[in-house]
Each structure stands twice: as C-alpha cells, then as structure tokens.
Image: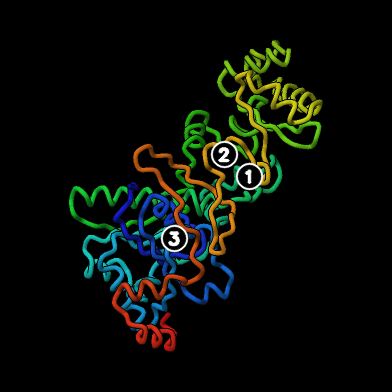
Amino acid sequence: MQALDGITVIDLSRLLPGPFCSMILADHGARVIAIEDKKFLADGLFISNINRNKESISLNLKTAEGKEIFFKLIEKADVILEGFRPDVVKKLGVDYDSIKQINPKIIYCSISGYGQNGPLKDSAGHDINYLSKSGILNLIGEKDKPPSIPGVQFADIAGGSMNAAIGILLALYNREKTGKGQYIDISMTDGMLSFQAIPLYMYLLTGSPQERSNSLLSHRYAFYNTYETADGKYISIGALEHRFWKNLCEHLKVPEYIKLQYDEEKKEEIINFFRTLFKKKNLAEWEKELSDKDVCFAAVKNFEEILNDPLFIERKMITSIKDKKGQNIPTIGIPIKLSETPGSIRTPPDTFGESTENILKELGYSENNIKNLYKNSVI
C-alpha cells in the first residue's frame, strides 16, 4: 500500500522540472506514463535516473494517430503534467480546456519559467535565469565579486518540481471532497521568489536589502560561516542561537567572544581568528573534536563522500537498484518518510520508449496496428 496507489499521471514534460516532479509521485505509488518525443533523444536530453518507477512511451502528438492515443490515455488518467512554454499545448490541441472536455476530473499541471501570464510568459529561460529574475542569484557568491551559479538546479527542482508536486497533491485532495479537477500554474521564478521570506523580513526590519555574502545567515559573522581546514577541506559553522555560540567559544577557549557574537567592530577580528584556528587541524580531527559539543557544525562533503556517508546509508538516502542488465547502480533514495504508506523504488528507469508497445496493447492496439504506427512515425 502506497499513498498514491490508483493514481495515474501522464507526463508530457522534458528535462528536469517535470520529470523530477513525476518521479516524486511515482516513488509514492502513482502510475506515471512519460510521453517522450524522439527529437529530445537525439539532443541527448533524456535524464534516465529521474525516470525510475515510470513507463516510457514514444508518441508524436503532431500526428492525428498520436493525439488519438493520447486522448485514450487521459480518459482514465488523474493528472497531466507538462512543461512547455505557454500556448504550446494549445497549438497541439492537448491544453487543459481541451482535455477537461474528455475528462472533467483531470488535474492539469503546467510548469514554466515565468508562468502562464505576464510579460515574460513566452520568454525562454533556464535555472540561472529564474534565479536571477527572482533575486536569488544576487545573494549567492563572494562579496564584491560576480554572483556564483550553484552546481544544482534550485529553481528547476525547488521552484518547479516540488511546488508542482505540492499543487498536484492539494488538487487531488480537493477533488476527493468536491469531485472537481482543476488547472495548476507553476512558475519556477515565482517559486524562487517565495524563498525570499527571510530577506524580506530583514529588509522590513532594517530598511536595507541583504548583500551577497554579507548578511546574518551568509558570512557576515563568524557564527554562520565556512572555514578551510589544514587538509584543504571545509567546515561549516551554524551557531546562530546564542547557546550554540557560547558552547563553541568556550570549547575553543575564547570566552571573550561570547558577548561579541553580533559585534560590528569585532566581527572581522573574530572571523580571522576562526580562519586561523580551523586551519590548524584536518577536517576529520575537527569532526571528531566537535561531534559531542552541540555547536551546529558540519563537514562540507563532496559527492563521492556523500555516496559513502553512514547517515545517508542508514536512512536509505543512498541506495542501489538493479538496472535492466541486473547490475546494481547507486541511486538517491526517497526523502519523504511515511510510516504507513512508505514510498519505494520498484523499477529501474525505462529506456527511451520502452513501454510503448505494452501500453498500446493495453489500449487495445494489435501487433499490426503497432507496426503501422511505427511505419507512420507516430511512435
């Protein structure tokens, strides 16, 4: 038993935001059928590891036969997910207004860069652009240097995928009560703007906007900072609450700094002291030394280190799955831990269009029908 057993999702999206969202739903029991387009395979844009627990069907929606197959799929579907620019699905004839005529209970979710309305709705963009427009990128990087592009796609996933998953679950819950489907408009830029909660609070409190690497929670003070260790690695200190700062200062034998946690005149002196101090020992030594001191610290891990981290292994966040050849491959686990209806990694990612024939047979197409669909480039 899983939370989304019995829910069918038709995923028209590409790249990262939509497929990551549908992976979340699939991990918790939804049947996800990913509608793929061969031109994206040629571009090398098929990210296989976020397609676990899904079925992949290759379908050309620009053909009448392809659209007919799609309409058959959505007759019994619960959710449609798409990530095209606004109006693309309307041109294809698979927009919400068209689909709800066939399935009034459908929940239709669109993920786009700037939303379905507004002056930028038709503009192209990527993660870096959504971070920029929302003001997030301006807060990332070193002080007095250009903004730094993060190595993971925050706008795509946090602004797009996760908000879409939340919206879909809210709509499913509402449908249980009302019997009505609805349309969901997710803008990745909107999603990232919502992350400005603390910067807005601080702006209203102080009258000044936050500066890159020079704010309460970003390098301005010693208690919330990163430091290099003797072996060229890094440690993060997050001793925001005074009790944690007190514990750290007492352990490092600098009790005079306890009352100077927010001191503007002494902040550079304290930061420089910590920089010098942390460079005296290797990261492993600091980890051992601070492990029981209740000071809010963590080693800055690289990717290979997290793959072998006991925390993630015990919590099954680093696990493995057998691929189609029976080989164990590492995969990231399921972060939402439900006690009664836990998610699961059941099947490895389909290869591109792997489930096409099985799904068509399920819809009543014969072997001969399928051969003709291949011949006419419908699938």
Q: Residue 242's spot in the image, x, y percent? A: 57, 17
Residue positioned 66% across, 48% down in the render:
148
Closer to the camera: disc 1 or disc 3? Answer: 1
**Image quadrant in which the C terminus is located:** bottom left
Q: Residue 170's spot in the image, x, y percent? A: 30, 48
The 10 Å Cα crowd at callout 3, few under 14, some 14 to 19, many 20 or more, is: many
What residue would you read off at disc 3? 112
What residue would you read off at disc 1? 307
In this picture, residue 252 sits left or right of residue 57: right
Q: Do callouts 2 and 1 mark residues in contact (Cβ within 8 Å)?
A: yes
In the image, 369 versus 269, the foreground residue is 369
Query: As shown in the figure, which amino acid type bears the numbered disc 1?
Result: Leu
What residue would you read off at disc 2? 312
Residue extending farthest to the left is 178
Of pointers 1 and 3, the one earlier in the residue sequence: 3
Q: Residue 251's spot in the image, x, y percent? A: 69, 14
In this picture, residue 220 sits left or right of residue 159: right
Check the image and report above or below for 179 versus 88.
Answer: above
Query: As shown in the figure, which amino acid type bears the numbered disc 3?
Result: Ser
In the image, 302 versus 141, the foreground residue is 302
Residue positioned 60% across, 42% down in the render:
139
Query: What separation in Å lies between label 2 and label 1 (alpha carbons)?
Result: 8 Å
The 10 Å Cα crowd at callout 2, few under 14, some 14 to 19, many 20 or more, is: some
Of pointers 2 and 1, the one earlier in the residue sequence: 1
In the image, 319 versus 145, the foreground residue is 319
Residue positioned 44% across, 88% down in the render:
375
Query: As shown in the figure, which amino acid type bears the numbered disc 2?
Result: Phe
Residue 23, quarter of picture: bottom left
